[in-house]
Image: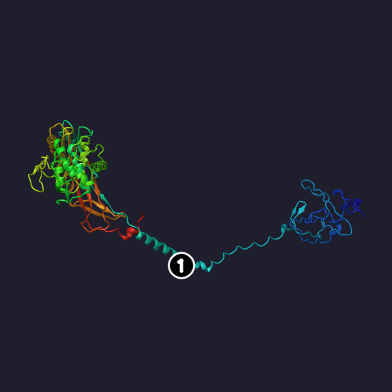
């Protein structure tokens, strides 16, 4: 049959058992011939309508043909198409809304067997009432591998290595440097008002107490001619570069022909001179004594030549030394101070004299009343007539018409067991010589010494601090002598510990010093000083 020939409609559906007519409740359906190899149904959902002759037969259980196998109620499985002819497909009736009950349903035949299924309207799902699959038993935990049992020794060994490493690291770490901590107050203030000193009416003056500071000044700070006070710098530079042992004469020096040739000119200017002669030989000590005691200008220029070969180079060294000492108002043009262009201030000259008093042999030389030549001859008196008075131990005088009378001095005063160094300067005095400056200085030094007072902070043997090893250990420190602070009314004095204590020291050994202004008291260990204990080193966190 041709594919384009249409099939005649065939009326099908349930009929009345008595008359054989179609039941009114069912609408007629028309069968159409469908070409071969064409299917109008989903292959995974078989559809069947029940027939009268199937009522007596039990419905065979059709195997599901896919995940969506749906079987309509009261319908038989359609006959699968064959190759002999076209397949007739009965279209499904359209279900009425809200699933109304069927009119005149066919009588129930108890012999008819339907598969057990729960009805869901016109659609039934055969597997809905099937027994659910058995539950899958929970997976049992896999047994711990035997190798896990061997992890504990490894963990313990690693922990032991870590602990040993930490202990070794703590023990080999450098211990902190010990420090000194005082139990004394960090300062002491003397009650009262600052002392009023007898300052000269002209020129400049200053008084300084070593370790305490400046007691007072007068006259401003403008640079003025120094005169022979400049010879302090000449001696300072020469002794710094050519040290002289205390009590020793030093090397022998020969006077230069140039220096001898300048003697007539210097005598004409009435300079203070030793009076060097050709081929004269002087020891270093005698040359410095002539320079500082009788203020010999000719020796000052000879020292410059002996040091550098020429005066200009030596003067450059003098200015460099002044800069290093902080003498900002000072400038040198010659080694003797005769040139009025050599200028300075009283404050700068105090800085210089304080530094010179620490140079070996300088304090010995300036503490002489007179100069005695090596080859014999009459002694020559110096201009510092304050030596031995008010504790004055040294100084240097100077005078020129341009400078007036100048004097720098150093004095020592014992105040309740504390040796105090007083340094001062008086410059620019209107006098025909340096004597006016020396006299003014005597009044100042006497008043300054009278203003000094003392206070005892701790007796000898008192515990005044301890050594801290930095890890919690301490060793007491005791004062080797009374801790006494010196000052004057209105002054505040700092109290500090000085020195680098060792890690170990025997009982009673000096390990540091307490400095209270001008006083310095040794501190001794109150018991044996040891390094930090092993426990402190293990528990350290710093």
Q: Residues within 10 Å of mark 1 (few under 14, many from 20)?
A: few
| Above or below, 120 relative to 131 | above
List the residue tagged with mark 1. Answer: 153
Residue 34 rendering spot, x and y as whole percentages: 87, 53
* Relative depth, front residue between 75 and 392: 392
Residue 323 rendering spot, x and y as whole percentages: 26, 41
Q: Is residue 327 visible?
A: yes
Q: Is 39 positioned to the left or the right of 243 in the image?
A: right
Q: How many marks overall?
A: 1
Q: Residue furthest bottom?
A: 146
Q: Quadrant of the C terminus?
A: bottom left
| Above or below, 483 relative to 159 | above
Q: Is residue 412 visible?
A: no
Residue 392 rendering spot, x and y as whole percentages: 13, 42
In which quarter of the view is residue 212 placed? top left
* Relative depth, front residue between 328 and 301: 301
In which quarter of the view is residue 259 placed? top left
């Amino acid at each position: 049959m041709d594919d384009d020939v249409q099939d005649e409609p065939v009326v099908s559906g349930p009929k009345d058992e008595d008359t054989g007519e179609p039941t009114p409740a069912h609408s007629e359906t028309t069968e159409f011939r469908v070409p071969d190899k064409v299917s109008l149904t989903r292959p995974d959902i078989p559809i069947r309508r029940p027939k009268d002759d199937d009522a007596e037969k039990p419905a065979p259980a059709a195997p599901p043909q896919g995940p969506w196998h749906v079987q309509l109620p009261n319908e038989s499985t359609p006959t699968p198409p064959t190759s002999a002819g076209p397949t007739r497909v009965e279209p499904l009736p359209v279900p009425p809304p809200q699933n109304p009950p069927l009119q005149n349903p066919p009588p129930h035949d108890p012999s008819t067997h339907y598969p057990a299924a729960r009805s869901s309207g016109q659609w039934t799902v055969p597997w809905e009432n099937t027994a659910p699959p058995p539950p899958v038993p929970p997976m049992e935990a896999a047994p711990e591998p035997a190798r896990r049992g061997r992890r504990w020794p490894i963990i313990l060994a690693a922990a032991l290595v870590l602990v040993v490493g930490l202990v070794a690291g703590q023990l080999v770490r450098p211990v902190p440097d010990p420090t000194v901590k005082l139990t004394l107050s960090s300062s002491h203030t003397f009650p009262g008002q600052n002392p009023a000193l007898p300052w000269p009416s002209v020129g400049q003056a200053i008084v300084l107490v070593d370790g305490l500071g400046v007691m007072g000044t007068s006259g401003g700070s403008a640079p003025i001619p120094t005169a022979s006070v400049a010879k302090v710098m000449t001696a300072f530079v020469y002794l710094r570069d050519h040290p002289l042992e205390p009590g020793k004469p030093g090397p022998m020096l020969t006077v230069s022909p140039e220096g001898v040739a300048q003697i007539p000119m210097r005598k004409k200017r009435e300079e203070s001179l030793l009076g060097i002669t050709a081929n004269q030989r002087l020891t270093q000590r005698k040359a410095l004594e002539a320079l500082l005691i009788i203020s010999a200008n000719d020796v000052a220029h000879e020292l410059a030549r002996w040091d550098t070969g020429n005066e200009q180079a030596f003067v450059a060294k003098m200015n460099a030394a002044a800069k290093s000492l902080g003498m900002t108002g000072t400038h040198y043009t010659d080694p003797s101070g005769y040139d009025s262009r050599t200028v300075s201030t009283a404050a700068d000259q105090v800085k210089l004299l304080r530094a010179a008093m620490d140079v070996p042999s300088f304090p010995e030389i300036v503490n002489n009343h007179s100069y005695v030549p090596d080859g014999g001859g009459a002694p020559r008196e110096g201009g510092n007539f304050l030596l031995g008075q008010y504790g004055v131990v040294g100084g240097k005088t100077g005078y020129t018409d341009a400078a007036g009378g100048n004097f720098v001095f150093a004095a020592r005063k014992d105040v309740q067991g504390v040796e105090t160094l007083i340094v001062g300067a008086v410059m620019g005095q209107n006098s025909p010589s340096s004597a006016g400056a020396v006299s003014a200085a005597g009044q100042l030094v006497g008043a300054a010494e009278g203003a000094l007072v003392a206070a005892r902070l701790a007796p000898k043997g008192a515990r005044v601090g301890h050594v801290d090893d930095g890890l919690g250990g301490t060793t007491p420190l005791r004062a080797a002598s009374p801790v006494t602070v010196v000052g004057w009314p209105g002054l505040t004095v700092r109290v500090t510990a000085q020195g680098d204590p060792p890690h170990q020291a025997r009982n009673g050994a000096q390990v540091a010093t307490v400095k209270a202004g001008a006083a310095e008291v040794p501190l001794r260990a109150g018991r044996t000083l040891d390094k930090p204990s092993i426990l402190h080193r293990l528990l350290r966190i710093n």
